[in-house]
Amino acid sequence: MSKKNKTSSLSGLRKQEKKLGYIFASPWLIGLVIFGAFPILASLFLSFTRYRMVGTPEWIGLANYRALMFNDSIFWTSLWNTLYHVFLSVPLGLFVGIILALLLNSKIRGIGIYRTLFYLPNVVSIVAMSLLWLWLFQPNFGLINQVLSPIYNLFNMEPLGWYRDADLSKLTLILMGLWTAGGSMIIYLAQMQDIPKDYYEAAEIDGANGFQQIIKITLPLMTPSIFFNFIMGIIAGFQVFAIAYIMTQGGPGRSTYYYGYYLFDKMINDNNMGQASAMAWILLLITLVITLIALTLNRFVFYLGDQD
């Protein structure tokens, strides 16, 4: 076979493979357009309309956005609650996940069982998890206050109200979220076990102790996974809704009335799809801006290939 015919045959084979690839991917592509792209574009259109879930949407331009940002104090309250949640829960989640990974990166008998136990909360339904913590944080007979009762008695304190206290409710939900730190822990653990053992052996020869090895070797080489969990934590934090809906219903005094909760109320309880769509796009822009700012921290991320 001549070189020209061989090239033509390979070109035809590639075209056939490309066509088959599109055929096999078509169910996913169709689903993306119908259940993804279309609703996104529809919500963008509806954000510029007055639409009460029935009838025909009426075009009103930027009126929904103006009403939310300039005439709706609850909008700003819900946004502040969400920002508070994000900027406190993300660093705490990173810290707890890293500590767990360091503790579970050990070669002891049954370590696989411990890792499984710490990861298990991530497969528990959010509803079941919320109901469990609702009982644990119950001010009168909850297990946490029962355990802390000696401290309350020692300092002559009243038991903490936790989710029933407007000053503690947001912190209570954040602490509850730390129960699922095992999800990030698995990612850190995988990255830690990918670090070459030669680095630690060289550090031991130089006289570095265990703590120094963690600071100088482990943590710097974990920065890719830390950075990944940081970005994902920000995105997930802005979407917080279920735990507040189940545990506090946005209270007390709207202290846990998160942005997602307000969007839900606008759409389901007020039937105001226009403003709900506008809120969704505002949330997208806020999340996008903060994520882009966070991405500038990528220069502090150290990859194993950087030393070459």
Image (cartoon, rainbow, N blue to C red):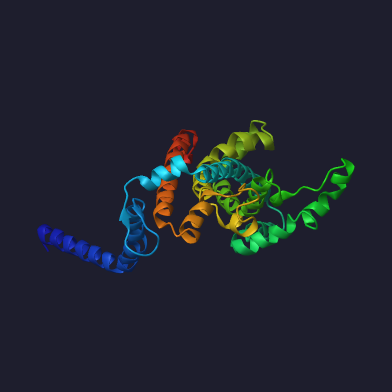
Q: Is residue 156 left or right of residue 249?
A: right
| Side (left or right) of 141 relative to 42 | right
Q: Is residue 187 visible?
A: yes
Q: Nearer the viewer, residue 80 or 29?
A: 80
> Is residue 195 visible in the rendered structure shown here?
no
The image quadrant where one finds the C terminus is top left
In the rendered image of this protein, does residue 145 appear above or below residue 77? below
Q: Residue at x 70, y 58 (%)?
A: 134
- Residue at the image position 59 percent from the left and 57 percent from the top: 245
Residue appearing at x 42%, y 52% in the figure: 275
Residue 69: horizontal and vertical position, in percent? 44, 41
Q: Nearer the viewer, residue 298 or 240?
A: 240
Q: Quadrant of residue 9?
A: bottom left
Q: Position of residue 10 (x, y in %)?
A: 18, 61
The quadrant the N terminus occupies is: bottom left
Residue 82, image x, y percentages = 55, 45
Residue 53 % position (x, y): 39, 63
Task: Name the outermost residue toward the top.
Answer: 206
Residue at 66 percent across and 56 percent down: it is 118
